[in-house]
Image: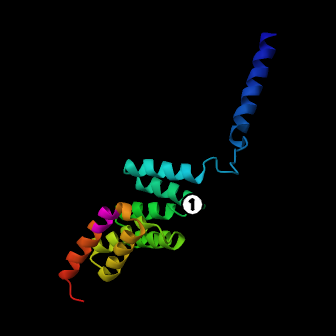
Amino acid sequence: MKKRTLLLLLALCSMLLATACSFPRVIVLKDPLTPEEHLNLGVTYEQQGDFDNAIKEYRLAAKNLPRANLYLGNAYFQKREWKEAEDFYRKAIEAEPDNADAHNNLAWLYYTRKENLEQAEGLAQKAVELNPGKGDVYRDTLEKIRELRKGFPK
């Protein structure tokens, strides 16, 4: 009897080994996270300096949450990928024209790059008008742009 049991166990083990690579895969058809959860996860990654994973999460959030474009712009800005940052700030403004942070951040990008300074000044001014509650922050951007513009010919 022991020999027969051992043979059955060996047969069972060989079957399991032979089929181990063919176990069915689990496919997730519905994302278990909400757009807000993806956004929050992206913020966590960004705070840790993991901008690539932050961008992945922000992209997932942006499918249904327009403000995620601002976060994408910020992450690309941190990576010094200026064109991508600009594109996402513009998308954020297009999706939410009253988003003062998007206007200010695009203005700051132009200030940082020392380009489009006239447009940057207009964007910063718009941010001040859109959200007077954060006027100090936006006025700081505006003043820095105006100071820089003094040194550049029109």
* Kind of element beneath mark 1: loop
Picture coordinates of residue 107, whole percent (x, y): 34, 72
Q: Which residue is mark 1?
A: 65
Range of magenta residues: 135-139
> Label 1: how many residues lie within 10 Å, few (<14), some (14-19) or many (20+)?
some
Magenta segment's dominant SS is helix
Residue at 77% x, 26% y: name it: 11
Residue at 31% x, 62% y: name it: 137
Quadrant where the C terminus is found in the figure: bottom left
- The verdict on residue 54 being magenta is no
User: Compared with residue 153, is residue 104 higher up or lower down, i.e. above or below?
Assistant: above
Picture coordinates of residue 78, whole percent (x, y): 35, 61
Quarter where residue 7 is shown: top right
User: Compared with residue 46, is residue 88 higher up or lower down, i.e. above or below?
Assistant: below
- Horizontal placement of 25 versus 87: left or right? right
What amino acid does circle 1 point to? Leu
User: Compared with residue 142, is residue 54 higher up or lower down, i.e. above or below?
Assistant: above
